[in-house]
Amino acid sequence: MRDFLENRIEASTSEGSGPLHAAHQAGTVISVVVIGVIALIGILIFAQINDALPSISNSELDSAATGVTDGFANAMDLVPIVLLVLVAALVISVVQRMRGQGGMR
């Protein structure tokens, strides 16, 4: 029993596990969620005000503005892939954390 308790204490205080590591993981997840919410709010605001902006009489500036908007719209096609990668990273970190708590060294 004593060996078991010593191993649990050693595992909880080693680098990469314990409450400090869990706090870092939680902070990372919260940061990603906050960045996603801020980006979503920015996209919604831009979508609302884009039509209200005055038209540009200079064709070069108008084509540049259209190019920026189209490029941003094309980048939004990558959002599902980014979300999939984030979910996969979260699953991998949970599996590693569970494996580390199983007593394996």
Image: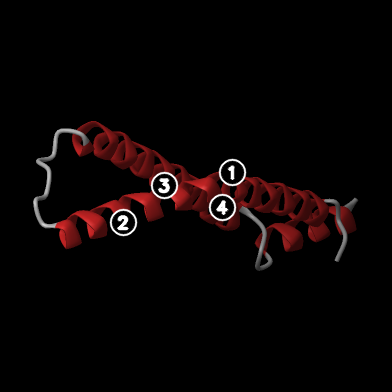
Using the image, determine if residue 44 lies above or below residue 61: above
**Label 3 sits on residue:** 73
Q: Residue 25's mark?
A: 4
Q: Name the quarter where the C terminus is drawn.
A: bottom right
Cα distance between the residues tagged 3 and 1: 13 Å
Cα distance between the residues tagged 4 and 3: 31 Å
Q: Is residue 31 visible?
A: no
Q: Earlier in the sequence, mark 3 or mark 1?
A: 3
**Label 2 sits on residue:** 68
Using the image, determine if residue 39 lies above or below residue 9: above
Q: Earlier in the sequence, mark 4 or mark 2?
A: 4
Cα distance between the residues tagged 2 and 3: 9 Å
Identity of the residue drawn at 39% across and 55% down: 71
Q: For the residue marked with disc 2, what is the amino acid?
A: Val
Q: Position of residue 104 (x, y in %)?
A: 88, 60
Q: Between tags 4 and 2, which lies in front?
A: 2
Q: Earlier in the sequence, mark 1 or mark 4?
A: 4
Query: Could you tell me which secondary element the residue under label 1 belongs to?
Result: helix
Q: Disc 4 vs disc 2: Cβ atoms closer than 8 Å?
A: no
**Label 1 sits on residue:** 80
Q: Position of residue 45 (x, y in %)?
A: 25, 35
Q: For the residue marked with disc 4, what is the amino acid?
A: Gln
